[in-house]
Amino acid sequence: MPEQSSDLARLAGSAVSARRVMEETFRFVSVPSPTGAEAEFATLYASALESLGLETALDEEFDNSPSVVARLRGSGGGPTLQLDGHSDTVPIPHGECSIDLEHNVVRGRGAADMKGGLAAICEALRALEEAGVRPRGDVLVTVHGLHEAPLGDQRTLRSLLRRGIAGDAAVIAELGHDHLATASRGMSIFRIEVRGSRTPVHEVELRTRDSNPIAAVRLLLDRLEEKAAVLEAGAEDAIGPETVFVGQVRSGDFYNRVPVGAEIVGTRRYRPPTAMGDVDKELRVLCEEAAARTGLEVSLSLQEVGPAYSLEPSEPVIEALCRGYWDAVGRELPLGAAGAVGNAADFVAHGVPAVYHGVNQETAHSDDEQVSGSDLARAARVLAATVVHFCGAERGRAS
């Protein structure tokens, strides 16, 4: 049986077209879909899946952010594999989209994160059909918006999962192009606000040095840096240590006016068993200290992007993806951990084992986001082979 499955996986992989998946990616990146405005692209993607023969619908629970839900019916007798991805891109302008067949590259916002992965899903399903390889189990495809933080809060996917729109396992078509993540740190975005005087005053009217909100900022930054140093001296395994990172500090509107407030925004990444509640408590202690030392109002808000999770390496979807990678690429896929936070954590929290496999995302969110045709084709071959190994397969086309 394993030999037969591998034969079918390689047969499907042989039907993958690098040019075709490049052209699909270019078509996808040509339709903008910043977070919260994904409707036009969702309609386009639904049309692409429908043209492949999938039963397709738009779930319009959230205005301007519909989810695509599609199903390829199997011949029966196998588990359901969910192929998943997000439709939105970061809301940052990008240069003109382009496709260069000679140099094997597609450029545009979302090329790497993650419209290239979505195109690879389409190509994998198309290759299975063209090769005459029919899965026994169903393939469920879900694509959803409102993913990219901070505007994205995963409400679309979490709603689908709460309503039972899920497979027996999931492969998310991003990250993991060169390793298979079996664990990930969780991440929350923290925002600390400091409030001082209600009205800005000239610096000579400053009552005490501590009444300047920047005094609290200085104290908080010192404490956050001390916390970061302690955390980074921790675990050195594949998951990596817990971290505190400050990315934004804002205060004041003129060089000699005392600010009325200040703000610190950053991330806190954490390993199992640490959870967002633990992070909330530790950061509130720092805020309370700063408030007591300065007499200023210091408040904290915390947004969870994704919880920490881990999977047992014996999960069937992990075995299927590793076998699929071997059939498609000809070498082993090493196990590791995800560096970024994605939607696998949401699946695992709802009892659905989930892993990643997509295109190289080194240029994700950059000013020159791009993906190569060879990488797109590799991702499509691996996804097709994973369907074969997880769902089971046989020769024949859907009726």
Image (cartoon, helix red, strand yellow):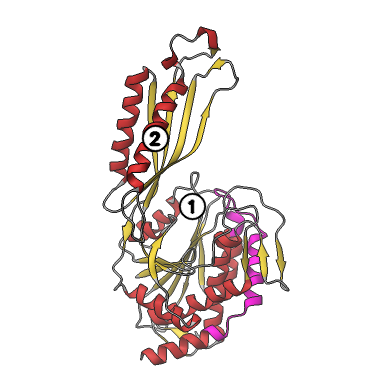
Inspect the image, locate mark 2, and give the three-letter code of the amino acid beneath it. Answer: Ser
**Circle 2 sits in a helix, a strand or a loop, which is it?**
strand
Nearer to the camera, 322 or 233? 233
**Circle 1 sits in a helix, a strand or a loop, which is it?**
loop
Q: Residue at x 62, y 69 (%)?
A: 372
| Left or right, residue 288 beside residue 122 | left
Nearer to the camera, 239 or 183? 239
Q: Which residues are magenta?
A: 13-41
Inspect the image, locate mark 1, and give the three-letter code of the amino acid beneath it. Answer: His
Residue 276 belongs to the span the image colors magenta: no
Q: Earlier in the sequence, mark 2 or mark 1?
A: 1
Residue under numbered circle 2: 301
| Left or right, residue 364 beside residue 236 | right
Q: Is residue 95 above or below residue 73?
A: above
Nearer to the camera, 50 or 124? 124
Number of the label disc, if any, that sits on residue 105 = none
